[in-house]
Image: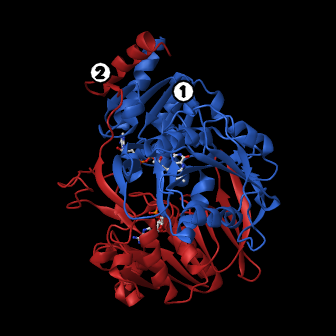
Chain colours: A blue, B red
Amino acid sequence: MANEVWVVLQHREGQISRISWETVGAAQKLAATLGSKAEAVLLGSGVGLAAAEVAKSDLAAVHVADHDALRAYTPGAYIGALASTIQSAAPAFVVFPHTYQTVDYMARLAQAVGAGLLPQVTAFQGEGGDLLWTRPVMSGKLQAKVRVKGEGTVLVSVQSGAFPADGVVRGEAPVKPLEVDLAAVKPDREILGYEEVGGDTVDLTKAEIIVAVGRGVGGADKMAPVEALAKALGAEIGASRPVIDNGWLPRDRQIGSSGQTVAPKLYVAAGISGAIQHLVGMKGSSVIVAINKDPGAPIFTVADYGIVGDLHEVLPALTEAVRAAKG
Amino acid sequence: MKIAVCIKQVPNTEARLRVRRDGRWLEEEDLPFIINESDEYALEEGLRIAEKTGGEVVVFSLGPDRVREALRKALAVGAARAVHLADPAFAGGDALATGRALAAALKRDSFDLVLTGSQSDDVGYGGTGSVVAGHLGWPHVWLVMGVELEEGNRAAKVTREMESGVNEVSRVQLPAVLEIQAGLNHPRYASLKGIMAAKKKEIATATPADLGLDAAQVGEAGSRLEIVSVAFPASGKGAQILQGDAKAAATALVEKLQKEARVL
Ligand SMILES: Cc1cc2nc3c(=O)[nH]c(=O)nc-3n(C[C@H](O)[C@H](O)[C@H](O)COP(=O)(O)OP(=O)(O)OC[C@H]3O[C@@H](n4cnc5c(N)ncnc54)[C@H](O)[C@@H]3O)c2cc1C
Ligand SMILES: Nc1ncnc2c1ncn2[C@@H]1O[C@H](COP(=O)(O)O)[C@@H](O)[C@H]1O
């Protein structure tokens, strides 16, 4: 019916991921504003223990599709398992954790079932049928408020870190098998394996101080002030994605959703705008310093201290000041 | 191989952004536009595959007249021709509406491979390519970091990025839609010769009617999402901004880090 909320959980070998718990909390909150109770869906093979874990939440049910074809994720099998159920039950919302797995199939699922697609939300406000959703646009430089129009199910994904993982309301939910017929699903993608990116990588997670540099540095040949500051601070050098993509630093220095997740006691971000994919990798740092020539850069919203200016002037001055302070 | 690449023109993120008077989107006057970052990589990958297999690249872009500049740039680096989905009705589409329109345009020709970027840097739905694949009935892979052709170009071994430094390696049968992630190659620059040659290349235009679509199925009318407003993020607790010239600010910062934050 028009107020049902489903939440599709992601897990790794039966371990429910942190962002999935955040998403359960978000779905519970959403269901409450619609006057219903959320229901969870778990896809996989041999996921009984995970289902029991989820069932300790305040949910109307935990629907489990336990099937050999769902052991490894493929979009064909996942869409196959979810499409007919969504079409027949027509919930108002199906909520997903915004992960690289979900994004891979969610849009196609929406297209297949004729649902709306609302990716990467960070908040919602409002009542009943009149909800306003918040999501980042312009790589996080702006926040958009979005409304859903028209009739029918909407698939929503929830940005990691937007809702608290410990925000799940506890309770007891019945576990129910979800019948899926995957015989007809032809694998659209034959999984050959999984590989680690770069074998003996620099482990930035152990660094106490990180000087991270972004596209604002301007080139591989302009890295000297970054290196000098890192040396003065005894820090490791990290980077945002474009620095790596441009080949200015090796891939093992990347921080963010597809790089390393770090939480040093001091993180200096120079010439980094603060896109969400970067923030998820460093916002756990104890103290964050941002140096950016744009006072409106979103990095300043998570930083403790900021200097607005050209990093090519600020970093040498900072190096001097650190050296002077250390004597 | 005959390859289509979908490129979107987006505001340059380096530019100073201003919110439009009605609050619903950016003020586009004086706003510089560029080809979406991951689409640049998709275009380069398409050109490389076409060169290797002796084929051609056709570029598609949906948007107002300004997107012809992006298409012209793609022609200058080596695309053979371009298709511009040009009609006010196309504007303001979500991933489903834009994907529907692009798929209809792609269907008028026959391609062995369609490449898109993984995510647009403006609205960032991360799904338009997957929607295109759904309409074409082809396999898709999102966030592609490597493509190797196999089986006499009838299949591809595709490396897909996942979180935390792991890649998924899979094989897909072609034709397929591959949604390219930034960083998998090094996009080329246009040569003077390329720029001159591009002037003679064709940019075809297509309206919803040309694609057999009703105006109500595309753009804002055909979308489930409606952007009500955009705003700069509220600064949360916000950073303490240290004032003065570089030297003064740096000295003040080090003092704060020592005495207040106690991390030095
Ligand atoms: C699926 C996916 C995964 C991603 N994974 C990651 C990831 O793991 N890590 C990551 O970082 N990004 C990731 N990204 C990219 C992310 O969305 C942003 O594009 C990226 O973080 C931006 O990097 P940046 O801040 O260095 O560059 P920009 O956003 O271009 O910002 C450059 C900044 O430098 C400032 N600047 C310019 N010149 C100067 C100067 N002289 N002095 C001071 N400041 C200056 C500018 O004001 C601007 O704020 C991912 C994107 C996608 C779609
Ligand atoms: N208006 C458009 N014209 C051409 N391609 C587009 C357009 N919008 C999106 N795309 C393609 O779809 C990809 C993903 O966009 P999005 O779903 O908006 O994140 C982009 O990287 C482009 O390759």
Name the side, left or right, on which B160 lies relative to B43: right
For label 2, the residue is B248
Q: Is mark 2 within 8 Å of ligand 1?
A: no
Dividing the picture into quarters, in which one does residue B189 lie? bottom left
Image location of residue A240, percent across then percent down: 51, 44
Q: Secondary structure at mark 1?
A: helix
Image location of residue B200, percent across then percent down: 36, 89
Q: Chain of mark 1?
A: A
Could you tell me which quadrant the N terminus of chain B lies in? bottom right
Identify the residue at image location x=49%, y=79%. Answer: B103
Q: Secondary structure at mark 2?
A: helix
Query: Which residue reaches farthest left?
Result: B21
Identify the residue at image location x=57%, y=23%. Answer: A234
For label 1, the residue is A231
Question: Label 1 is placed on what type of residue?
Answer: Lys
Q: Chain of mark 2?
A: B
Q: Is residue A275 visible?
A: no
